Image: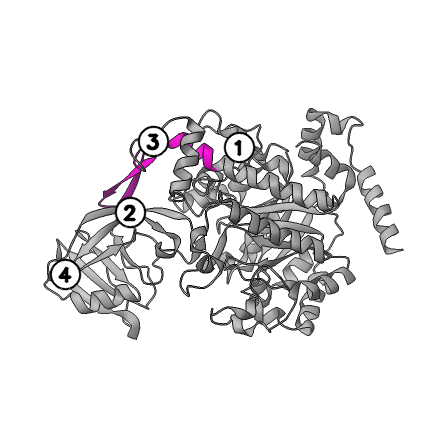
Amino acid sequence: MKKLFGVLLSVVLLSSLVIPAAATGNDKSRHQALQDLVNEDDKKARILWYDLSANIQNLNTPEKVKNIVEKTARANIDTIILDVKNYTGFVGYLSEIAPHMSTSEIPKYDEFPEGYDLLTEVIKEAHKHDIQVHANVNVFSEGNNDYKDGPAFENPQWQTTFYMASRIAEAANGETFDITGVNTTRGSNQLVMYTSSKYDVSPANQWGTEVQITDGVVTEVVDRTYGAPAVEVPENGVVLSGHGEARTWLNENVQVGDQLDYSASKTELVPATEYPSFSTFTNPIREDVQNYELSIIDEIISNYDVDGIVLDRARYSNINADFSDLSRERFEAYIGETVENWPEDIFRVEFTEEGQERIPGPHYQKWIEWRAGNIQNFFKKAEQLVHEKDSSLFFSTYVGAWYPLYYSEGVNWASKTHQPDYDWASPDYGKTGYAEVLDFLMTGNYFRDVTREEAIASGNPDWYSVEGSADIAFDVVNEATFVYGSLYLNQYQGDPEQFRKGLRSVMERSHGIMLFDLVYFEQFGWWDIIEEEFAEESKPPHQIPGLLKMVRDDK
């Protein structure tokens, strides 16, 4: 009876949306239908993400799962995205391929019970409420660098090779330490530099030592671990801030009155385990890596009653990856010539007083194009696997909504009909778009500023806003698939009305919304907000057969 009701509801909803009879064969009709769909308030997706590691304490027993899913149902959420394989490569289901969360050495993962099958528990409870469950798989990240744990450490040949440029801090005694970033977040065991062009005082947390350098001379050394305030950034100098190993180096080698030089620099190619990032990324063009990731997707859809598969981190780590011998070989074959100066003919790095600048080389645009094409090819393989196995399953992905910058991750999530007009885009870059492969696309409109005016007032481009990034996403996808804008709740902590404003902005400009993440609804007590905002009934577009067929026919 429940299934019959669902079919009837789909028919009613579809009949209320005007779709030309020839829509599935008429590109113009599809564009118009998906444009008009934005204004259909009763046809909006309402998706809630359950992050695996962040929600261990919320989901590590069947009783807790039942409680959380009941809250989700009361909020009229139609789809749960359950993170079943996170960035560490550990999984929250019973796998014969990937390691279980309970076997990890990462602190707090031991709170995930041995033999616990979270995916089964969520599916069981969600389906009682007619909520769909889509399993999220973090694809090309396979470990945690801070704790040296995950499949990438068991298979070091998988690791991506990074092109790393860094300044070198040299103390008066001749000891050196690499400066891994300028005006950026300080990570574990990192030494970073802060300049007066961006900061008046160091923005780093207290868990480190900070050194003030004025005109090349150390004027202050403060170990903030014991509660000391942040160090002021001098106008004619910098602050070096070190955590862990870098903190120890500063404490042992630097004193007030010393000369400290930070003008030298170096470039090197290093494996992921030596790169300053918490995620341990793999090389996405390796066949063994791809086969491993596809086997996990196959295992999930073969053994669990999931309603869909979501890909996350299905990308390169950043612009500095991957510069392995394999990537060089494949790229040279792609362009049909030898890269004489590797990697400088892709790009080189110049250091300035304010940081570092990337200078494109003669092959830069083709390199950007090639990487995006690699990711497009993987998406085609994954989609084919999912839909050949079961055409009723949904296939989607999450990406950052900052499209003008997202090329650095080697991803073109736009429609293949969209040709971007940026200096990094080659004439053929548009062909690497993968929106057509997706049943829907979730774009992370992760900005605290909601309106364009707010972004400008904050000193940013107008698209550094929920509103601006949502408009860009809709434009570049070009009605190739459904676009669901997404919000990161932690950005609105302490300001529920700004969150509500952002939610409404996404719903006005997209085909639906994804909310990240469950843990913040629990922490902030904001369930009542979405219960109010989602009080009226709605049907997600991807669950309306006629609309879905229209999207899938556009591959």
Q: Which residue is mark 1?
A: 432
Q: Tag on residue 268?
A: 2
Q: Quadrant of residue 517?
A: bottom right
Comparing marks 2 and 4, which lies closer to the viewer? Answer: 2
Q: Residue 209 at x, y = what percent? A: 25, 66
Q: Residue 194 at x, y = what percent? A: 27, 54
Comparing marks 1 and 3, which lies closer to the viewer? Answer: 3
Q: Which residues are magenta?
A: 344-371
Q: Is residue 219 magenta?
A: no
Comparing marks 3 and 2, which lies closer to the viewer? Answer: 3
Q: Which residue is mark 3?
A: 339
Residue 139 in view here: yes
The kind of secondary structure element at disc 1 is: helix
- Farthest-out residue, right: 1
Residue at the image point whose x is 28% and y is 47% from the top: 268
Identify the amino acid type marked 4.
Val
Q: Residue 67 at x, y = what percent? A: 69, 70
Q: Considering only vertical position in the picture, is 82 above or below 311?
A: below
Comparing marks 3 and 4, which lies closer to the viewer? Answer: 3
Alpha-carbon span between mark 2 and mark 4:
28 Å
Q: Residue 261 at x, y = what percent? A: 15, 54
Alpha-carbon span between mark 1 and mark 3:
22 Å
Q: Quadrant of residue 414?
A: top right
